Image (cartoon, rainbow, N blue to C red):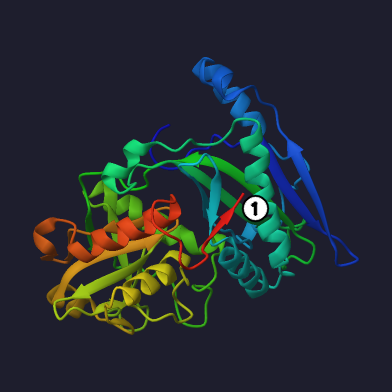
Amino acid sequence: MGKGFSLAIYPWVYTAKKMEDDNWEEKYTLKPHKTPEEEASMTEEEREKLLASRNSFPELPLVNYTTQYGMGCFEGMKAYPQADGSLKIFRPDDNAARFARSMAGLGMPPFPEDIFVKASLELVKKNADIGFRPVYNPKWEKDNFLFGESVYLRPFSYAEPGIGLGISHEPWVVFVGAPVGAYFRPGNTKARVSNCIRAFKGGTGWIKSDSNYVVPILEKKRAEAEGYMETIFLDAEKHKYVEEGSSCNIFFLLKNGTLVTPALEDTILPGITRKSLLTLAQNLGVKTEERKITIDEAMSDSAECFVTGTAAGLGYLESITKDDKTAVFNSGKMGELSETLLKTLKGIQYGKVEDKYGWMQSV
C-alpha cells in the first residue's frame, strides 16, 4: 500500500438518513468489488474503473447546502490491526461526541453517538470479513509504527437538496473506510508560519467543518512548494499567538521541561490525539499547560516541537521559519519526549503497549 491517504474505498459503506419522525434510517451497502487479490492483479485502468464505481452515491443529491456552501462536517478515525489478528478502533466514542457537536454547531440535528460508534465497528467488521483490512506486520515495530498501516474511517454529513442559503434539517450521514499508511513523508519536517488566517473568534474554527479546510489546504500546498512540510497559523486578532497547523494541533516542549499546547478556544479544533497525548505526558510526570503561547516564545524557548492528529499521529518538527528567522529544535532531530510519546501512543494503538485508559474498542 502506498503512503498517506488512499481513495481505494472499501466495498461496504454505511449511510443514515434523518427522517421526518426524527429517527435515522440506516443502511449498509455492498459496492462492486472482487477479492483483494483479484483487485491487486487488475490493470491500473480496470482498477480505477472499479474504485470509481465504489465512490459513487447516486442516491445523494448533487446540489445541496454541502456542495454549494460547505455546510457539512466530517470525522477522521482509524482502526488498527493487532498482533493477534484482530482490529481495534481508537477512541470512537470521542469522535462520536465531536461529530455530534459539529453537526449541532452547523444547525443540523446531531447524529446519535451510540449509533455512530456501532456503525464504525460494524463497518470495519463487514469489510474485514471479506478481506479488506490491513494485517499486522512486526516490521512496523522497529520505527515505532511510523509506517504502520491501518483502516482510515471517514464519517461525514451530507445535506438534503437545496440551492438557497439554508441549513440542513434532514441530512445524510455517510461512513466509508479506506487503507492508509504514513501521513508525513520522511526527510522533511520543516514548518513555516502562515500570514493567512485559518479561523477567527466567533466563527467555526472549533467545528470540524468542510469549509474550515479551504485556507489550510491552500496554505499547506504553498508551503510544500516552498520546501516545507507544514504551515502554522497564528491568531486572527493580534497575529502573534500560535493556534494550530494545517490539519493538526501543535505542542512545544519548553527548555524548562513544560509541555505547552494552545488552549482550546473557539478557533482551535479539539483534537482527540491532542487530548490523548496530554494524558500520556501527564502520566510520565511531565508538567503540561494549555495556554496562549506566542510564536516568539515558541521559537526562542522550545527544545522540541511536534504536531498531532488522527492522520499524523505525532509528527515532530525540526524547525519553524517566520519571515527571515528560523528556529531549529533539538538539532533538527526528534526529541526524547516526542519519541517516547510517539512510541507509547502507537504502541497502545497497535496493541504492543497496555491500554490503561480503555481507548481501544474491539471490532
- The quadrant in which the N terminus is found is top left
Q: Nearer the viewer, residue 48 or 153?
A: 153
Which residue extends farthest right? Answer: 21
Q: Nearer the viewer, residue 192 or 190?
A: 190
Q: Is residue 335 left or right of residue 285?
A: left
Image position of 211 with respect to 58: above or below = below
The reply to whether residue 11 is visible in this rendering is yes
- Residue that appears at 20% across and 44% down: 187
Q: Residue 182, position in %: x, y?
A: 37, 44
The reply to whether residue 198 is visible in this rendering is no
Quarter-of-image position of residue 138? top left
- Residue that appears at 63% across and 55% down: 156
- Residue that appears at 51% across and 14% down: 43
Q: Is residue 3 left or right of residue 324?
A: right
Q: Residue 152, position in %: x, y?
A: 52, 47
Which residue extends farthest left? Answer: 331
Mark 1 falls on what kind of element? helix
Task: Using a 10 Å C-alpha cutoff, classify the residue at mark 1 as few (fewer than 14 neighbours), some (14 to 19) or many (20 or more).
Answer: many
- The residue tagged 1 is 120
Q: Is residue 115 left or right of residue 180?
A: right
The amino acid at mark 1 is: Ser
Q: Residue 160, position in %: x, y?
A: 77, 57
Q: Nearer the viewer, residue 155 or 217?
A: 155
